[in-house]
């Protein structure tokens, strides 16, 4: 489902996201993510269907093919895109509660949706989540991807704070800045992301409740983009996570793993990887770049 961007709409959706992230009994058969993109995005790349399907889904006040014509390849509105699904894993009964709450969120100007029927396969549903663009906007950007294990975001006021941060970018159409953000629930005691922590992989922060990306693209305004992200970093300590927890696929900043490993691994996992590297590649032959776990020399890691 997609909504015309409004800060109140975003906050209400993030409130639902936080509620589900804090619920230890949130069933693992549900997935839920909230995405925000600035104006001028290629809306068709976010929509699971053809151009004709999208234009048919758009309300008449946005596109009717007669008096209103939407350029879906460079959409003039900022949008909030929500992906939500339930997959029959045979462990719980379907409840429409989450979907009804999403549909009932207050909005202005427009909203539209595409839903599957009961016979849709998991592979087809998953394909509907794909962003088909190589990148959201044709500009350089400053990246952030972080996770939190907090179950108190409702108390810290993160939804209100983060909605305000996004609005600072989107509300000013002449600042040379565009944002793309994606926020997803990971939590619940049934989460397989958490329960698979000891399955032999070395992914960090398996206790995450929410993970998020907020990238800011800039045209002739690098300083503005940097200032925005610096303020996000400072505020996140209070509102989102007291620790700077990053993920390998969304890495940013310093790429020297010797310096930044505490952002990506807990000390036990990192030391385990160093010992493996010491046995398998003690001379560092397979070192593509500094963003690699170095072979162990001592049994105890130093920290930042």
Image (cartoon, helix red, strand yellow):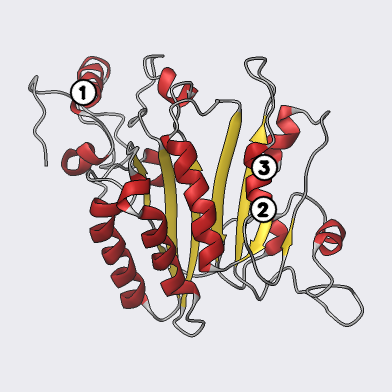
At mark 3, the secondary structure is helix
User: Tag count in the figure?
Assistant: 3
Q: Quadrant of the C terminus?
A: top left
Of residues 174 and 270, the one drawn nearer to the viewer in this rendering: 174
Front residue of 63 and 218: 63
The residue beneath circle 1 is 274
Q: Select label 3 or label 1 by which is in front.
A: 3
- Regarding residue 100, the answer to whether it shows in the image is yes
Q: Nearer the viewer, residue 66 or 138?
A: 66
Residue 212, x across and y down, in percent: 43, 48
Distance between the Cα atoms at labels 3 and 2?
9 Å
Residue 146 in sight: no
The residue wearing badge 3 is: 99
Q: Which residue is drawn at the image coordinates 81% and 67% (left, top)?
A: 59
Q: Is residue 83 left or right of 174 when viewed as pictured?
A: right
Looking at the image, is mark 3 or mark 2 nearer the viewer? 2
Q: Is residue 130 above or below residue 283?
A: below
Task: Give percent across and percent down for residue 158.
Answer: 36, 54
Outermost residue on the bottom side: it is 174
The kind of secondary structure element at disc 1 is helix
CB-based contact (under 8 Å), mark 1 and mark 2: no
Ranked by sequence position, the earlier of labels 3 and 1 is 3
Lower sequence index among marks 3 and 2: 3
Mark 3 crowd level (few <14, some 14–19, many ≥20, 10 Å Cα): some
Callout 2 secondary element? loop
Q: State the residue at coordinates (67%, 15%).
A: 90
Q: Is residue 1 left or right of residue 237?
A: right
* Residue 197: x %, y % from top left: 38, 19
Residue at image mark 2: 104
């Amino acid at each position: 489902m997609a909504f015309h961007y409004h800060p109140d709409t975003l906050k209400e959706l993030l409130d639902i996201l936080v509620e589900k992230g804090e619920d230890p009994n949130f069933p693992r058969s549900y997935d839920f993510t909230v995405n925000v993109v600035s104006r001028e995005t290629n809306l068709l790349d976010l929509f699971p269907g053809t151009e004709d399907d999208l234009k048919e889904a758009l309300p008449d006040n946005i596109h009717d093919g007669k008096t209103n014509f939407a350029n879906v390849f460079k959409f003039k509105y900022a949008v909030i895109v929500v992906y939500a699904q339930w997959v029959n894993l045979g462990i719980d009964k379907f409840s429409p509660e989450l979907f009804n709450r999403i549909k009932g969120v207050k909005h202005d100007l427009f909203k539209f949706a595409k839903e599957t029927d009961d016979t849709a396969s998991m592979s087809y549903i998953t394909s509907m989540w794909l962003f088909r663009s190589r990148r959201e906007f044709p500009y350089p950007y400053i990246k952030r991807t972080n996770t939190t294990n907090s179950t108190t975001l409702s108390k810290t006021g993160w939804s209100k704070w983060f909605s305000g941060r996004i609005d600072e970018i989107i509300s000013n159409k002449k600042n040379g800045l565009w944002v793309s953000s994606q926020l997803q629930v990971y939590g619940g005691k049934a989460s397989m992301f958490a329960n698979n922590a000891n399955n032999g992989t070395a992914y960090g922060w398996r206790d995450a409740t929410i993970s998020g990306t907020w990238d800011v693209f800039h045209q002739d305004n690098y300083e503005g983009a940097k200032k925005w992200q610096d303020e996000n970093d400072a505020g996140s300590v209070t509102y989102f996570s007291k620790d700077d927890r990053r993920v390998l696929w969304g890495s940013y900043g310093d790429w020297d793993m010797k310096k930044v490993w505490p952002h990506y691994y807990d000390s036990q996992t990192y030391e385990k990887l160093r010992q493996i590297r010491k046995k398998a590649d003690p001379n560092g032959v397979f070192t593509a770049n500094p963003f690699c776990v170095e072979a162990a020399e001592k049994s105890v890691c130093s920290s930042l």
